[in-house]
Image (cartoon, helix red, strand yellow):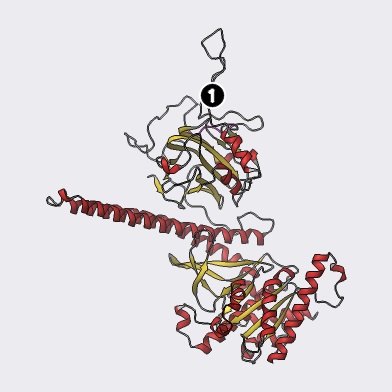
Amino acid sequence: MTAELVRGQNHPLPETRLEIRVSAGHPVLVGATLGDEQGRVAGAEWIAHPGAPALPGVGVPGPAAADHRLAVDLDAVPDAVHRVSVLLALTGGAARFRALAAPFVAVAGPDGTEIASYTLTGLDRESAVVALELYRRQGAWKVRAMGQGYEGGLADLLGDQGLERPADLAAAILATATPEAPEADPSSTVPSRVPEPEHVPRTAPATPPPTPATGIGTGGPVDYSHPRRRTAPAPAPEPRQAPPVPVAGDASGWSMDERLYNQVWGMFEDLARTAAAYRSACDFAESRLDRELDETLTDYRARADGANDAARAAARARHDELVERAREVLDRDLAQLAAESEVVEPALPVAYARWDNPVWHSYRVPAEEPMAVRLGDLHLPERTDLRIPMLVRLPLERGLWVDSGRGHSEAAGLLDEVELRRLALDCAVAHAARLLAAHPADGFTVHVVDPAGAGAAALAPLVETGAAAPPARGAAGVSAVLEQLTERVDLLQMAVRGGAADALPPGLDAARQLLIVHDFPHGFDDRAVTRLRYLADEGPSVGVHLLMVAAREDAAAYGPLLDPLWRSLLRLTPVPDDHLADPWVGHAWSYEPPLLPPGSVVLRQVLTQVAAARHGKQL
């Protein structure tokens, strides 16, 4: 059964030899690009188009036409290629897709059976579009319905894929869209050069073309029927392959930590896209149902004989079928991600692991800084038990803010103010401990500001183990710490800008600095607030970072003066909250803080080792 995809939805490919069919109803240029894991194309030589139709594993048709067929052999593409993007571009007088019928693309197997199809609806002022994307995931290939249009045309599309001088490159490609007239011998009516068939890729000098995915060009039967208008039933598809068995660390990278980091964010992207596809399918089903029900109401002639009731029942049945199919795809993808999570989670190193992971019991102070640290978990409402680690790259590019206010979180509303503030400081201590544990012994220094001394109990693990100095108290203590760190930022910035890093004072601590600020704005005067804002803005670039524990409403007296401060910090919460959004599809992700299990002594054990290593002691 063919999977009819909606934008953003993916589908596994049971075959690696494929034929991609394009039916546009108007002449379009078809091409393909070979990209890495991020979709970046290394250069013009990795673009297949009518002027250079053959790449390893990919063969595109000739000049612009209304119907095309592309031959793809995914086993033949280079190992560095993780994405094959199929492009459509308008040429000549047709400037925008909105004036044309929606293009249709289908992916078929070697026997001609359709695996997946996608109708590119909703295009408007675009003149170029990425129609489909074949991408490699865990050693297996999938197809994703993209529909990513570009109003700036092929130049914008190529520029978005990382190519240099995209305007010149686009112009050269579009120039190949017009078919060349055959050269004729004046003494004969027979052409001396017969144009090659548009569906057979010409052989590139360096690489032989892939074998066509169908019988076309090989003497086999040609199916001229429209891919969506078959008059005879399609042959039964071969049994689908079982989903790949998840393996920890199967992403690209130089080390296991880098491979696991890339794998975790691949899981995050897959969860985001599969949820977006499911929501899009449900929205489409709802809008189509509304439209069809409205149409039945306008047909007054069918009211008398009951045809309206039958039409409404049929519309609801189509709606339920589409939602059910979308749910089946979602459940399949979620099950695969859950299986992958069960394999990946136990294999994570200390910096990426939850506090209840046994890896912490064998903790040793690292010799070098890791790529990232885990600051919590993320999940979506489609499956709340499927949690993706929230990994943040090191060194931190932004400060952190643990919000001790109620905000709009339902979980925060269940706690009283004192308990919520204590929980916020516990979270901050857990974040600080993880940062300390992730760095070498002399690589990270923690300062604490607690003007009223209200956080002594929560800060005890840091102070009593010697991992951090006793907190600064009162307005004088706050001022002294802020002045010290501000001077440090000034010195380091001058050294970096002047290229005189060797001229820094010999006693300057070379470690990265973390300032934990508790109970803000208590104990802060205007000068201290100005310095705090300065540290938030300028500190991260020279290794000085903030970890604020504060409620925004407590600082309401400052009005909009502190708005830039809050915006410059990454807001985290001590209770689950859905305040984080990704920049790709805009999901509201639920964040869960990395609290320690009740009664756990792991944090103190880790901090004791960190402090001993800093003082050169052996445990």
Q: Is residue 501 above or below residue 448?
A: above
- Asked whether 6 or 505 is in front, the reply is 505
Q: Could you tell me how many numbered marks the image carries?
A: 1
* Residue 600 located within the stretch drawn in magenta: no
Q: At numbered mark 1, what does the secondary structure look like: helix, strand or loop?
A: loop
Q: Which residue is mark 1?
A: 196
Res 34 quadrant in image: top right
Residue 372 image point, x, y percent: 65, 66
How many residues crowd mark 1 within 10 Å: few (<14), some (14–19), many (20+)?
Answer: few
Quick one: quadrant of the N terminus? top left
Q: Can residue 248 be seen at all in this image of the molecule?
A: yes
Q: Is residue 190 above or below residue 12?
A: above
Res 558 quadrant in image: bottom right
- Asked whether 503 or 81 is in front, the reply is 503
The residue drawn where x is 29% and y is 52% is: 318
Which residue range is magenta in the image?
Answer: 209-213
Res 442 quadrant in image: bottom right
In the image, farthest residue toward the left = 304
Using residue 233 as the reference point, say whether residue 352 is left or right of it: right
Mark 1 residue type: Glu
Residue 499 image point, x, y percent: 83, 64
